[in-house]
Image (tube, coloured by chain):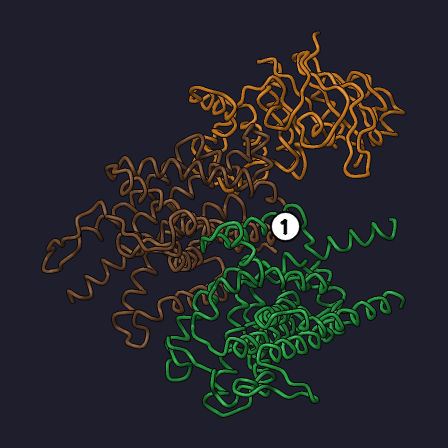
Amino acid sequence: MTNFLQQVVSGLASGGIYGALALALVLIHRATGVINFAQGEMATFSTYILWTLTQNHGWPYWPALAVTLAISFAGGFGVHQLVVRPVERGSVLRVVIVTIGLLLLINGAMTWIWSGEVRSVHSPFPTRTIDMGGVAISIQDLGTIGVSIGVVILLGLFFRFTKVGLALRAAATNPAEARLVGVRVPLLLGVGWGLATMLGAIAGALTAPTVFLDPNMMQAVLIYAFAAAVLGGIDSPVGAVVGGLLLGVGLNLLGTYVNFVGADLRLPAALSVILAVLLFRPAGLFGHRVVKRV
Amino acid sequence: MTALLVLEGVEARYGPVRALRGVTLEVGEGEIVAVLGANGAGKTTTLRAVSGTVRRSGSIKLAGRALSGGPEAVAKAGIAHVPEGRGTFAELTVTENLRLGAYTRRGKIDADVERMAAWFPWLIERGDQQAGTLSGGEQQMLALARALMSRPRLLMLDEPSLGLAPLVVREIFRIVRELNEQEGLAVLVVEQDARIALAAAHRAYVLEVGEVAVTGTSAELRENESVRKSYLGY
Amino acid sequence: MRRTATSAGLFAALVVAIAVLPKFLTDFRAQQFAYVAVYLVALIGLNVLTGYTGQMSLGHGAFMAVGGYTTAILMTDHGIKDLWTIPAAAVVAGAAGFLFGLPALRLTGLYLALATFAIAVATPAVIKKFEGFTGGGSGKNLFGVKELTGGIAPVHVLGWKLNFNNWLYYLCWTVALVLYVVAWLLLRGRTGRAFRAVRDSETAALSSGVSLARYKTLAFGVSAAYAGVAGSLFAIATTYVNPDTFPVQLSIFLLVGVVVGGLGSLTGLIAGAIFIEFLPLWAQDISKSPGAPGVVYGVILIGVIFLLPTGAAGLLRRVASLFRGR
């Protein structure tokens, strides 16, 4: 039983990370109508910035994180304005190919700038465990869960109660009307990309301490995030987070209790989730309409 | 009466199709002006030319200043456009729709929401309802309220009667008329239903294949039998 | 009719050029050009799917893996001569593609891209897992296996003596050119029209009586069979397969090749295949960093989408029309 609970908690921790990156995918899907295949690479790039600031320049963790988030926001905004905006109105295929181009470009750039060697990034949370009713739970896991849930709540408040957040939702769901009330739609979609990139940076910073930082760090996480986003409903921010947590716990339990799956078949298991949801419930758990874009 | 909106020789095209072939019209301060005509005459395009959602040429001036740029700039200049087919944000709540209406303005909007509640009392109690779940008439009223939230200098309505029950249409035009009388709101309204539009408007223009065919006060147009027969269809 | 004659003439010229090219190439270069032929086969397959029927696949490397492993397993465990494993790879991969095409019918555009991408990422893990069958992480070695033609002694064909790399060159290009003609015949006729109808408008295709399901799954099957052949040739050429022989990057590069070559065109794909094979080498001139090719690929991919949406084929057409004085 204690093992079960420990697995659930560590599943929630990885699920929180999947949820954060899935949320980034959902934000961009709502803003631009595509899936950003470069989301993982962008997150890893942000993590490298964090690594550079803390390791090479000796900054304390939190200021370094704040600067990383700011740079990530600007980067995401810039990417949208520079390369996505010009093709946004064209076919989905073209936009997807552009995000694939970004994936290759950013992945190569990371190897170029920081070399392919693995780096280690510290966690802001202590690695020791605390005892909760006989269950040993690592503080890092708790921190990860706390951060991802906190981020989601903050983002929810932003979308609900701020003028920019509201305008962003309007721009994403109904761009023509939004322009009529004075919203500068392309600019706000760029803000959406910026926020998504910030979320990715958080996901990257939370991932890095448990694995090592290398240019392909987020490749698998991106697939889990795809699965989480599809599971929750690709247009539902709440769904993305719930999907991420479900997936994190589910994969962890599957890996622990089903010998055949073990640690090796986590990716194929996520793939089966994607296929099963797309085939049998395309709107996901929380999506309220079937999205069909040809 | 001083002129608020002046269009001179405005042309617009959709690809190779010329939708407007030099439209000249005027809306005075505190005036309700109707644009009438058959389907495809260019009524909707006239409004779209003003708000910049269609490529246009010619001169469009608001209070003496040329309007150029996209719909964002036109909205900021003080024109609120309620497009055909309501134009509410279906996925957002009633209150959020109202907040978006005031997007171009700075500062508090509580007073405006209260003002809207005086005209449309149901807006407050149903503030958390998704706009898409409202009835057609309610959506049209919400669209109207949202437009008014920006405190526009000019309100543009595109076919407000479309698909609504006669009683609801009458209610909407009553409110528009009262807003005009009490607050001096200038309105440019496009309507298929000439009878109801002429009842509310001070003046009207009749468009035919992208040009102004006839213009006059509402009374003149109503009384001119040949105009009524050939253009207005009643 | 005149167009067909011109095309046939150009094709004959191409065949001759390919036949004599090895005379001017070093052994090493001949091998590189053999890989160009391998990529060409895979690109033709992907273009049938993405360019002609508008279904995006980011997972064609997975079908190449199916073909490559079919060849490797048949050669090492069942003693079948390499040449005979090529059609087997086409059949196995084609069947896999057809089977995947059935559920894929319900996925449009973006979701298909996502699902196929996930397949490409998950494939190496699956290969590793079934160790007894695939050799797991250590893979399968074909070098020194007697079923590999030309691996030990030079190959004699019609009185010519060919070393291994030249043999590879002629093998791969023969297969590629035959499959090129097959694709050309398939796409110019009724089937090609149906594919394009599916791409351009599903509703129109439906109303004109084209069976969407039939042609979409057919396109998947054909496309995957081509990828399977490419994977098979790839395995023979590298004489070794392991889970990392067919990484997700391969799938992405194939997409790059098709976009650079020109979606919905066959001739441009040769340029696309050359691009995939030689770009990493050219990129070395820019920087020795292993990241440089990725950067160049990315920049060119985005650049092509911005500046040349019709790829190399479109560029060729434009140049050709200049010469015709239009």
Front residue of C226/B131: it is C226
Q: Quadrant of residue A182?
A: top right
Q: In this view, does B126 lie to the left or right of C180?
A: left
**Which chain's colour is orange?**
B
Residue B202: image location, x then y, percent: 72, 16
- Position above or below: B156 against A277: above
Label 1 marks a residue whose chain is C
**Which chain's colour is green?**
C
Give me the residue at 52% from left, 66% from top: C59
Front residue of A16/A212: it is A212
Residue C266: image location, x then y, percent: 71, 65
Residue B118: image location, x then y, percent: 48, 22
Residue C43: image location, x then y, percent: 62, 66
Total marks placed: 1
Inspect the image, locate mark 1, and give the three-letter code of the amino acid beneath it: Val
**Which chain's colour is brown?**
A
In the rendered image, the residue lying farthest to the top is B1
Q: Is residue C204 left or right of residue A79?
A: right
Front residue of B35/C315: it is C315
Q: Give the residue number, with chain letter if any, for mark 1.
A: C304
Give me the residue at 32% from left, 73% from top: A261
Query: Under tag 1, what secondary structure?
Result: helix
